[in-house]
Amino acid sequence: MSVEGEKFAAIVFNPVKTDAEKLKRIFTAGAAEHGWGEPHFVETTVDDPGVSMAKQAVERGASVVVAAGGDGTVRCVAEGLRSSGVPIAIVPAGTGNLLARNLDLPLSNIKQSMTVAYTGSDRAIDIGIAEVRSEEVPTQQYVFLVMAGMGIDAQMIANTNDDLKKSVGWLAYADAVVRSLADLKPFRIRYQLAESAPHSAHVSTILVANCGTLPAGIELLPDAKIDDGKLDLAVLQPKGALGWLQVWRKVRWENGVLRRSSIGRRILKASEGRDRTVTYLRSPMVTVKPDDPQQLELDGDEIGMTTATRFTVDALALTVKVPAPRSRAAAKQRAADNA
C-alpha cells in the first residue's frame, strides 16, 4: 500500500491486450527502484474502457496515470485526464499504437515504458474534440488524440478482421483496405473551417488529425503538429485506380522522401496545385456534414454513423510522459553505435 503523501502511479490496463502479471511485476519493482509508492492497478472493462478509472485515479491523488493497452485504452484514459494536469504515461500494447509512434515512445518494451512513466519529462499536447450528431442518439462528445475520419478509413476499421490483427498486427488493415475498396463509393460532404465559407466536395475520405504519422513510417499529414492548437485535414478525392496510385505516391514518395531534402522541397513547391487527389487544410475547427450518414472512426475506434460532426481543439489539455532529454540522447547514441 502507498503511504499517504507518497507519489504513486495508477496503472489502467486492458487485460485482453496486456500481460497483466508482467506489467504488475515491472511497475511494482520500478516503483521501489525510483522511490515511488506501491502502484495501483485497475483493469478496464467493456462498460468502462478507462475514462472513469482515470478520473478516479486523479481524485485519489495519483502522480501519473499509465494507460496500458491499445489506442482505444489510451484515448479513454486521456479523456479522463483532460485538463487535470496529471500526466498520462503509455505502455503500447495495441495494433497501431499511433500516439506512441508520433511521440517516439518505446513501442514494445514494458521496462522502458515503466522508466518513462517514473522518470520521464512532461510534455503538453493538444486533444481533439469530436461532437458527433447522429439519427439514433443525441449529440455526443468524444476526444481523440491522433486522427478522426469518414470514408474508406472508417470502413477499413469496420472491416478489419480481429483474428488477423492478432496474427499479423497492423498489416491486417491492408486486407481491410482491399475489402473496403470493393464497396467504396465517393460521397458528398459540406465542410466549413473556422471563419471560412462552407465548401462542398465529393470525397472518398476526409481525415481530421492532431498528428499525422502512421505505422511503417507513413507520413499521411507531414505538417501536422500535436501541440499547435490546430487540426490538419486531408481531403482525398482520387478517381479510379490511377487516383489511388497518386494518393500512394504522394504519401510515400512526396511526404516520405522529397520533403526530407531541400531539393525535394523545391520540387514539391514547383508542382503545387497540380495534384488534386489530396488536399491539405488546417484550422482550429471544422464541421463536416455528409449528405448521407457515414461511418466515423476516432483513433481506430469505430464510433458509428454520423450525420454531422464538429471537430475542435482543446489546446495543450493533456500532459504526456516522454523520455527525459538525457534518455533520448542516450537512445540516439546507442542507435549510432549499433549502425
Image: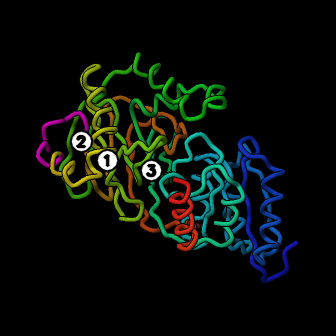
| Image quarter (top left, top right, bottom left or bottom right) of the N terminus | bottom right
User: Could you tell whether 223 is left or right of 24 in the image?
Assistant: left
Is residue 325 positioned above or below 251 on the image? below
Is residue 215 positioned above or below 175 on the image? below
Within 10 angstroms of label 3, few (less than 14), some, or many (20 or more) residues? many
What amino acid type should be assigned to the residue bearing mark 2? Thr
User: Could you tell whether 309 is left or right of 107 in the image?
Assistant: left
Residue located farthest toward the bottom when viewing the structure as drawn = 5
What amino acid type should be assigned to the residue bearing mark 3? Ala
Residue 41: % across, % down:
79, 59
Q: Nearer the viewer, mark 2 or mark 3?
A: 2
Q: Earlier in the sequence, mark 2 or mark 3?
A: 3
Magenta residues? Answer: 268-278
What amino acid type should be assigned to the residue bearing mark 1? Leu
Distance Cα–Cα, label 2 vs label 3? 21 Å
Residue at image mark 2: 279
Residue at image mark 3: 130
**Mark on residue 233?**
1
